[in-house]
Amino acid sequence: MTEPPLESWDLLPGTLVEIRRAGRPVQTGRIDAVTVNADVLWLAANGMHPRRLFEKAEGYEVWPVRTD
């Protein structure tokens, strides 16, 4: 069963998520930080991917990644 996208972005740093836009995967990673209003988040740098900012207003969605 597929989890729905997360409406609230006020997640704890370290949470593993997949970022999607227009239904397509953009990047998977761990949340590094979230703004107070939870409209912007950063994924931590990982390997060849630098730290990256995503804004809800630009159409990005956050999907939980199950690790079990």
Image (cartoon, grey):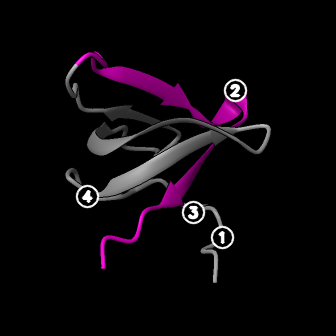
Give the mark nearer the N terminus: 3 vs 4: 3
Q: Seen from this angle, which residue lies furthest right?
A: 22
Instruction: Look at the image and say whether residue 23 sits in the magenta stretch.
Output: no
Q: Residue 22 placed where, x, y %?
A: 79, 37
> At 26% from the left edge and 16% from the top edge, which residue is drawn?
48
Q: Cα distance, mark 2 to mark 1?
A: 19 Å
Q: Residue 29 placed where, x, y %?
A: 33, 42
Q: Mark 1 near mark 3, Cβ–Cβ under 8 Å?
A: yes
Q: Is residue 45 left or right of residue 23?
A: left
Nearer the observer, disc 1 or disc 3? 1
Q: Cα distance, mark 1 to mark 3?
A: 6 Å
Instruction: Give the labeled residue for mark 2.
Output: 58
Q: SS class of the residue under badge 1?
A: loop
Q: Mark 3 near mark 4, Cβ–Cβ under 8 Å?
A: no
Q: Residues within 10 Å of mark 3 (few under 14, many from 20)?
A: few
Instruction: Specify start and end residues of the magenta stretch as a single range.
Output: 48-68
Nearer to us in this view, 11 or 20: 20
Q: Residue 51 placed where, x, y %?
A: 28, 20
Give the mark nearer the N terminus: 3 vs 2: 3
Name the residue type under label 2: Glu
Instruction: Give the labeled residue for mark 1.
Output: 4
Number of on-image labels: 4
Instruction: Give the answer, above or below, for where 43 lies relative to 66.
Output: above
Q: Quadrant of residue 55?
A: top right
Q: Quadrant of residue 36?
A: top left
Q: Quadrant of residue 49?
A: top left
